[in-house]
Image (tube, helix red, strand yellow):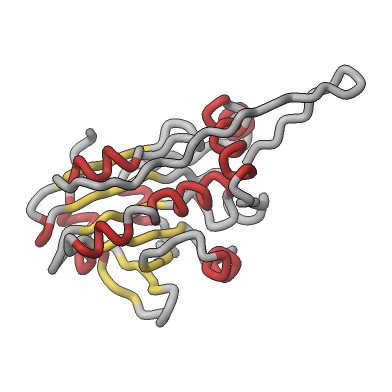
Amino acid sequence: MAKVDLDKVGKNLLKSADSGEKVELKSLWQDQPVVVFFLRRFGCQVCRWTAAEISKLEPDLRASGVSLVGVGPEQFGLQEFTEGGFFKGTIYVDEEKKCYKDLGFRRYSALSVVPAALGKKVRDVASKASAAGIQGNFSGDLLQSGGMLIVAKGGEKVLLHFIQDSPGDFVPLEDISTALGLSSSVKAGQKPVVRLFPQNNVILVRVF
């Protein structure tokens, strides 16, 4: 886990999706522990599925006094994401992407994003999302990656700092609970059986 300068990153401003008010990131952990999920983009199918998975923990987190927050790197796609009900926590936008930069979340190049998007991890999660009826689009910034930050109350310490290597990477629910010292009966979504049907010697694979 890479070292995080909470004092530096905590001063970055986020825009509330509800009120439009701008708040410092550190205000999110001032009075309670917080799980901050940084999405690649609001239209990403994989991100939407991951948001729905993480949201399974929301009742347990709330009962334990832990705040659940989602952050996107741009306003684009926010309304559709919100109306879709994919995430049960509070949503913010990092319009300047300073948190993404300070937390080491990588940006792909136009060339590197293609093989990353076609990787097995992305295909596996995309198949889970499709099986759950979750769709996505290709609108917005396709090059930004994301991750997760879990911070103890008052910014006492970083409990988890996760950086995506592949767009299909995500933190398992049990790892989030473990980082917070919580127990949860929530089970992660099961991987569906995937069948590929070649047609005319071509196999089409849906990705994010």
* Residue for point 41% across, 64% down: 88
Left or right? Give the position of 192 relative to 96. Answer: right
Residue 11 in sight in this render: no
The percent coordinates of residue 111 (x first, y second) are: 62, 31
Measured along the vertical axis of the image, is residue 159 above or below residue 65? Answer: above
Q: Position of residue 120 (x, y in %)?
A: 57, 25
Q: Is residue 80 above or below residue 195?
A: below
Question: On the image, which quarter does residue 34 sit in?
Answer: bottom left
Question: Residue placed farthest to the right in the image?
Answer: 200
The spot of residue 94 in percent (x, y) is 40, 62
Viewer-nearest residue: 20 or 65 = 65
Q: Nearer the viewer, residue 84 or 42?
A: 84
Picture coordinates of residue 46 (x, y %)? Answer: 54, 44
Give whichever of 133, 73 is nearer the camera: 133
Marks counted in the figure total 0
Q: Residue at x 24, y 64 (%)?
A: 62
Residue found at the far front of this picture: 185
* Depth order, front residue of 207/87: 87
Vertical arrangement, residue 51 with respect to residue 123, above or below: below
x 67%, y 52%: residue: 137
Q: Is residue 185 left or right of residue 168?
A: left
Single out the residue that lies furthest toward the top: 201
Residue 163 can be seen, yes or no? yes
Residue at 33% across, 61% down: 69
